[in-house]
Image (cartoon, rainbow, N blue to C red):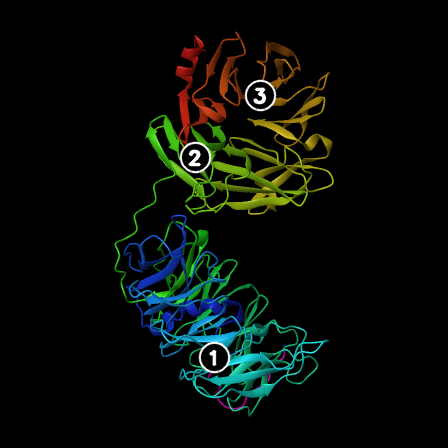
Amino acid sequence: MKLLAVAGLLVLCGTFGFSRAATVGEAASAAGATAGDWVLLSSNRDGKDRVYSVGANGEPLTPLFAPGPPRLVPVAVSRNGRTIAYIAGRDAPDVGPLYVSRADGTGLRRAGYVPTAGLEVFSPNGKFLAFTGKRGIWIVGSDGRGLRRLTSTGEEWFDWSPDSKALVFLRMLTRTFYSDGPYGIVVKPLRGKSRVIVRTGPHDDDHTFEYQPQWSPNGRWISYINHEEKTRLNGLTLVRPNGTQRHRVVIGTDGEEDYQWSADGRWLALLDGAELDYIRPNGAWHKISNDALGSVAWSPDGKKLAFSESKGLVVGRADGRGLRRLHVSAGAELTWLPDARHIGFAGDYRQIWVVGSDGQGLRRLTNEGANSLVGWTRLPPVLPPAPPNPPTERVLDANTVATSTPVEDLSADGPRVAFVPRPTLTDCFHVVAWSPGGALERLGNLPAPCPGQTTTGVKPLVLAGTRAAWVSSGGEGGDCYFDVASATLTDPVPVEVASGQVACGPDTGHLRGDGDLLVFNDETHHLPWLVRLGVGSRRCGGLPCATLRTGAQAAPVDAASGALIAVKRLGTVTVLNDQGTIVRSFPFSPADVSAARLDGGHLVVARSYTLESYDVATGTLERSQPLPAGYQLAEVDGGIAVLRRAQSIIVLRLDNGASLRLAPGQPPMFADLETPGLYYSYATGDGGGRVVFLSRADLLQQLGGSR
């Protein structure tokens, strides 16, 4: 990139083209808000998209409007933080009628029907709202009155003059059979005739928003990205509002740059891909980051710039010095409070956070739903606070948990169990860990809706010690794919471990674990890999890992217990140690093994009609029991096997054949047996579910004896 010097002081201001919708945050730059002000946001926390206010100092989340139609999606906030514009209806914000209201939720008024809507921006003085609609740019008073069309063609981008008396935009002047263009940079007064101040050459892209014409806050300059190829003006270009003194400040040939000037006009932030540079009007520049994520915001006083990187939020001086990484995840929505000492942003789990520019005072303002930052206001909402959503799971007693939906999978290890409930209207995928007699611990996402999703797609879920891991699989267009993720009780934010495309089948993604042994099959390679997670010198996504074995005897893994791993293939079950070395192979004829489980030094297999137990050290068949018709082998622990089918569970002692049948409810049912006892789940008739713990002492008593 080459930068050209510009004579004179250029006081320019704008917003990045990729985040022009950040006009909803313009309230933060002029309202003079402090940490005690109200944060405006949109959220679907209760399954419906609604607009809320929440106090930055902890005042409760409060809706702006009572439940019911119309559905309102906020699209712009006036710079004084007092007026909000919305697109309403089922298809908002893409299509629908336009509404305006005061920022406290009063004075809601329909401003007219807009068949198609795009960019919406309040005038600097807050008296007007301009927006792109059907066949041009429209304008309406901030009180919802006086709707009229300002232009008659399909402009996609515009900006206000600082005095709120005119707009600037790009218009296609002619269209030929071979190309679009030429284009014109047009200044249109609210009253009076428009004038073309720049005529560009033809271009093969008719998306006029890519030119990003912007008006400097002092009214002296209009800036735009010139797409003319092979001309001396290609790149970021400036021109006077009367069309004179046109010159280029940044050379660029692909039109992919996005730019934003500080409020004092001393610095320009230029984002090209992931590279972020600070640039002075005289052409001096400093490279700041090669890892910027497309979220950049100047402080209102122009002295600091905040931006997001993959490692967290970064704040620095305008000259690029004194950069400080706050180590908090910030998404595309990033807004300074006008005191220049606090930053609001959308972070992990799409929640709204606020933090001081010094990295102190981090506070999460929301804890439910998918949230979008709208802006700031000093107007407290008039309605009462929003009631909390009912919990998705709750402890009924020391041995029972009630779930709002049936459980989709369950895995236990020692004193705790992990389970995955089906999504609800207000709560999407998450893993719950529970120790009988204790509280519920949530792994994964905070409560948030996932519209239309009726299943998590998780199979299997494995709990190994305090770490849970799961495989999510699905298919699209005849292709099947999987994702492996993991979280712990001490670090419940899931990390991706592996993902890829695999052959379609019922057993996509083999994952097994016990204690500190957690293994899975990475089948994205020509030959499958048996990978151990949590240890090793290489990385599998966010976790250390080690490849124990590759090739035919590496997959599919069917069991893990202690320091042993069982791999089940057609006609053979191979037992490996935790280093991937073969301990013993067991051939079976006929090749009818449906499941293999490990119980200490014993291998238990389910065949067509029998359960068979073998000593791993010697290979000796120890005992054989009939396998009840229609049941699958779920788990074996301490000489007791757990069998399940759709509507019942059988617990079977392998030494004497004593059995206990449990039919507590409706399918689906899952069960796992550990040293403390039996963990199982079932669905209830009201659409919910139960997770139940039965101690080993009670289990043995019901089996008719003790061990």
Earlier-in-chain disc, 3 versus 1: 1
Q: Residue at x 43, y 70 (%)?
A: 23
The residue to which callout 1 is attached is 150
Q: Indicate the amino acid at tag 3.
A: Gln
Query: Marks 2 and 1, how far apart in space?
Result: 53 Å
Query: Marks 3 and 1, how far apart in space?
Result: 71 Å
Q: Tell me, yes or no, whether the two marked residues, 3 and 1, touch with CB atoms within 8 Å.
A: no
Q: Report x, y in % for residue 110.
A: 37, 66
| Residue 529 falls in image quadrant | top right
Q: Main secondary structure of the magenta part?
A: loop
Considering the image in quadrants, where does the C terminus appear? Answer: top left
Viewer-side label of 3, 1: 1
Q: Tell me, yes or no, whether the two marked residues, 2 and 3, touch with CB atoms within 8 Å.
A: no
Q: Is residue 8 magenta?
A: yes
Q: Is residue 453 visible?
A: yes
Considering the image in quadrants, where does the N terminus appear? Answer: bottom right
Q: Is residue 353 left or right of residue 569?
A: left
Q: Residue at x 51, y 79 (%)?
A: 151
Q: Report x, y in % for residue 607.
A: 64, 17
The magenta span reads 2-12
Mark number, residue 632: 3
The residue to which callout 2 is attached is 405
426 lies above or below 85: above
Q: Report x, y in % for residue 31.
A: 33, 72
567 lies above or below 387: above
- Which secondary structure lies at badge 3? strand
Viewer-side label of 2, 1: 1
